[in-house]
Each structure stands twice: as C-alpha cells, then as structure tokens.
Amino acid sequence: MRSRPPILTLLTVMVAAMFSVLCACQKGPTEQQSEQQLPAVEELSEVPDMEFTEFDAGWPPQVRGITDAELVPWDSLPGALTAELQVEILDRLFADEEVTDTLGERFAFIAAEAIGTGKENDLSPGFNAVFFSHSNNSTVNVQLNDALETVAVETIEPSIYQPPAGPGEFEEAIGAAREALIELEFDLTDLQSDGILAHPSQRTSPKAYFYDRRVIYVSFSRGEDAPPSFFALVDLTNRKILDSGPAAGSAADTR
C-alpha cells in the first residue's frame, strides 16, 4: 500500500481545519444572539422633565444641563423662487392698492413661494407672498395666480401666527439693540450680533405661542459658538426696547 504524498496530507489537514472554523463561526453568533434579549417596553427609561433657560441666557432657549448639542443641516424649501421672479412678484404687489393699503407704511417682506404645484395639492397654480406689517401689526399673506395677478389678501393677528423674521427686520432690530446697549455704556467692540423671532416665555392662553406684537431677540457674542454676552428684546411694532443688558452667566452679569 502506497503512502499518501506529504502535500496531500497537508492539504487535507488545512481543509479540515478551515471547515471546523467555518462551522464554529456560523454557530457562535447564533448561540450568542439567543442569549441576548431586547429590553421590555416597561423597562425603557421615560423622557425626563425639562427646564429651559430664560431670554437673557440666549435664544433660542436651551434645555438646562444639555450637552453635545448639534445643529441640524437644512435645504431650501420646495417651491422656492429665483431672486428675479421674487422681484417681479413684489413689483406687481406694490402696484396693487389693496396690498399696499393692507401693508401700510412700515412692513417687512418675508418670503414668496410657488403653490399648487404638487400632485396632491388642491390649490390652483400660483404664488404666495408673506409680509409682516409693522404699521398694522399683522401677518399679511397675498395669493397670486400664475399670471401674477392678486387673488386674495389675508391678514392674521400676531398672537395667532407670525412668520420668521426677515433680513430687514434683523437689521433694524440689531441696530436698535446696539444703540440701546451702547447708551447703557456696555462695550460691544468685536462682538458678533445675531437675531431671531422671539416667543413669550409665559403664554397668556394655551394657543398664545406668539407675542401680540413683533418682537425680535438680539444677542451679541464673541463668536458663533460662544454664549451671548449681551442681549436685547426689540419691539419692532412699537419701536421700543423691552429689555436689554448683560446675558445671564456672562462676564458682565453682576446679578
């Protein structure tokens, strides 16, 4: 009887070893998975009660003690218009007496968008332009058809709804806030400014999510990621400073 060549013996041992390892790999995770169990629903932790910071600590309000907060990226909304088309829409609206009477002398253009373009949308194709009238203290929605003719003009009370603030409103509010803080002899040198539509910290009714006037929260800080050093609440409707001074916890805060 002839003996098996050494090379065949080696290959046989290697194949047997590989088969054993393969079997073990296929068996191991299955046994391990069988030992793991998902926690029962009643064992999951409940959402804790949260407390939020006040206006003078920065805007928007933050959950007290929060860590590792991250900004969420965003894209332009569907239906956003080109700058050229927005100019054409505004030219048409400012030539409409009903629209200009509703807006008054002081107002801010917020945005314009195409409407009625979705397959499941019941609106006729056209456009919608949003303003905030400081003269009449109301949100103004103007609907146009696809020929840029005014179809409807709607006003909404500020306590019911307000759109986000527009660039012109930020510019006015930041200027007023800067002037008020400098008058109080606060040094704003090298500080960056920012602003956002303010909401009342205490609602007068369950549906009162907005002030009854146009209020912008303005902050001044040493950088994008730095906490505010100073703040101001600016009432654009009445052109008043509602509150201003060092932000809570800042180096200038002596309270």
Image (spheres, helix red, strand yellow):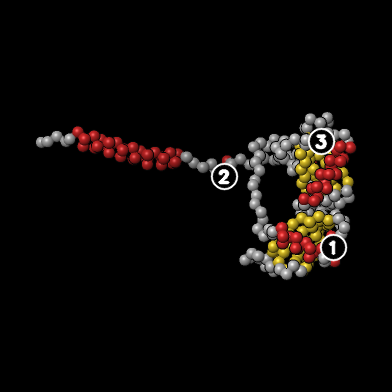
Q: Amino acid at mark 2?
A: Val
Q: What residue is pinned by disc 1?
A: 100
* Local crowd size for mark 3, using a 10 Å CA cut-off: few (<14), some (14–19), many (≥20): some
Residue found at x 75% / y 60%: 87
Where is the N terminus found, in terms of image quarters? top left
Q: What residue is pinned by disc 3?
A: 188
Q: Which mark is residue 41?
A: 2
Secondary structure type for disc 2: helix
Task: Estimate the x, y position of residue 126 in percent, counting from the top left.
Answer: 71, 66
- Vertical order, 60 against 82 (above or below): above
Secondary structure type for disc 1: helix
Task: Estimate the x, y position of residue 169 in percent, counting from the top left.
Answer: 80, 50
Q: Amino acid at mark 3?
A: Leu
Query: How much space separates mark 1 and mark 3, taking CA atoms?
Result: 38 Å
- The answer to whether residue 199 of the structure is visible from this angle is no
Count up the numbered dots. Answer: 3
